[in-house]
Amino acid sequence: MKNVIEIERLTHRYGKRIIYEDMNFAVPQGKVVGLLGKNGVGKTTLIKILMGFLRPESGVCRIFGENPHNLSPATRARIGLLFEGHLAYEFMTISQIERFYSAFYPSWNRDIYFDLVDRLKLPYSHKIGNMSCGQRSQVVLGLIFAQNPDLMILDDYSMGLDAGYRRLFLDYLSEYVKDGTKTVFVTSHVIQDMEKIVDEVIFLLRGGEIIQTSLSEFMSDFRQYNFEKNITLEKLETDKIIRNIDTYGKSACVYSFESKEKVLGHIRGKGIDANNIQPVSMTLEDAFIGLTGKY
Amino acid sequence: MIKSLLYKEWLKLRYYWTVAFLINILFLAYLFIDIRHQFVFEHAEMIWYQAFHIGNILYDKIKYLPLVIGIIIGAAQFVPEMLGNRFRLSLHLPVEPDVLVFRSVVMGILSVGGIFLIDVFLLCYVISVFFPLEGAKSAFFTSLSWFFAGIVAYTGTALCALEPQNFRKIVYLVLTAGFVLIFYQGDNYESYNRIFLKPAIISFLFIPSVIFSAYRYRNRTNLA
């Protein structure tokens, strides 16, 4: 399977703060890949690098085999890009922005744009600058779908969308990826939506560590273990086996990619008197918090 | 695609351009009334003496008008692009980025240039109503440097708006102010006739420099 996005040995820092160091991953064609990470780990920075708006310190990025800083117009036309905050030309109206963008994209589908925009029940002469964040996002997503791109890069698509519009967006996205040729690289803070749409997840952790896996593999391999009775975990620290420790009141749990036996043995090896642990079923959001921590 | 890019620039500029155009027309109408007023209340030979012997430029009230128009059109065109970094939207369009910026600047120069051409025509007409043809010809050459200052003000505004680094913005601002001042050094009729070509040619270098600012915007290593 061809890779649409390739990142090799990517390093970037702001001053002394390392954002990524030797980061590698690829996004295969026909997949919906979710980039997940806490605020400030560099998700938007990564998208800016990928789209050639920021030059990384070192490393190689390729989109459709091209350097993001020298993307040919033909390749740009294949990429639908949603900027964080649903950026749009605020001086244009609903109809003006459609007229403007339609000239650039050969397979422009105006019906899909007006289908999404008509649900806003606004006149076409309504200025984008006078819209609410949710209304604007609907217009911007409509433009991206109308473009019918081979690759969609969506930076926090859910920002400002209410539950109904989020569901509507997911319906359109499912339709868009149905034939298996379209690729989506998406970030969002609404993790429960990601569970419905992504094939693969990339967890971006502080310091640039990444974990890339299929959603099904992650959900089956990453586990939360609850302790059967109240326990003190002061001696326990995160390591390769214990990915995270969460204590709340007198209860405690640990998160790990390892089996129950291995985790229990590891905890006992630290001199902690743990009789038994129980795996607990998790949603993607639980697992995301388990992996990255609450704070 | 070119039509679409022009359409976007027009949407940004249309109100500002129309207001700028009307202000210019009103200014020139005022100039006509002002000169006529002088001819009504003064002896014609006194006005002639003041204008062509003492060297008072009768129409220097429009001196800074092109400068203001250049800044307004430049800001109207590029500030909306930079608010919230919306310039990225333009850079993501399937068009070569340098070509895209160049077309925007050309559109802006045509917008200010259009107003300036009408100004020059009306100024020469107003002067020709009260003075011989030589007076109108002299008005053309005298005012040319002010209109060039307007073009420099426009490109300088674009340059500063697109530049991502604040320090460089200040440097460009100083450079622009310096170039603009060159065109305001003469306070006599046709002061620039012998030396006009050199600063005019150098001024045109401001146009590709806007492309350089846009290039720097695309190639930042820091978002600050």
Image: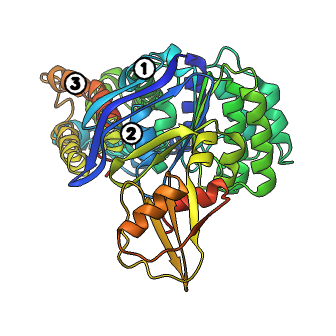
Question: Toward the viewer: A210 or B171?
Answer: A210
- Discs 3, 2 touching: Cβ within 8 Å: no
- Please check whether the numbered discs 3 and 2 fall on a single chain: yes
* Disc 1 and disc 2 on one polypeptide chain: no
Q: Is residue A293 above or below residue A37?
A: below
* C-alpha span from label 3 to label 2: 16 Å
Please state if A127 lies on the left or on the right of A23 as rendered: right
Q: Residues within 10 Å of mark 2 (few under 14, many from 20)?
A: many
The mark closer to the camera, 3 or 1, is 1
Return the chain for callout 1: A
Quarter of the figure with residue B125? top left
Residue type (three-letter) at the residue carrying disc 2: Gly
Report the residue marked by disc 2. B70
Can you say whether A131 is above or below A57 in the image? below
Q: Which residue, given by chain and number where applicable, does mark 1 sit on?
A: A71
Q: In the figure, is residue B3 to the left or right of B103?
A: right
Q: Residue furthest bottom?
A: A250
Residue B34 coordinates in the image, percent (x, y): 43, 48
Location of residue B26 in the rendering, given as x and y in whole percent from the top left corner: 52, 45
Closer to the chain start, of discs 3 and 2, is 2
* CB contact under 8 Å: marks 3 and 1: no
Residue at x-position 38% and y-position 44%: B71
* Relative horizontal placement of residue B53, taking residue B162 as reference (left or right): left
- Amino acid type at circle 1 is Leu
What residue do we see at 58% from left, 22% from top? A29
Confirm or deny contact between disc 1 and disc 2 (CB under 8 A). Answer: no
Q: Residue at x 49, y 74 (%)?
A: A274
Q: Which residue is mark 3?
A: B200
Report helix, strand or loop for mark 3. helix
- Asked whether, in this view, residue A230 is left or right of residue B201, the answer is right
Instruction: Note whether A112 is above or below A213 in the view shown.
Output: above
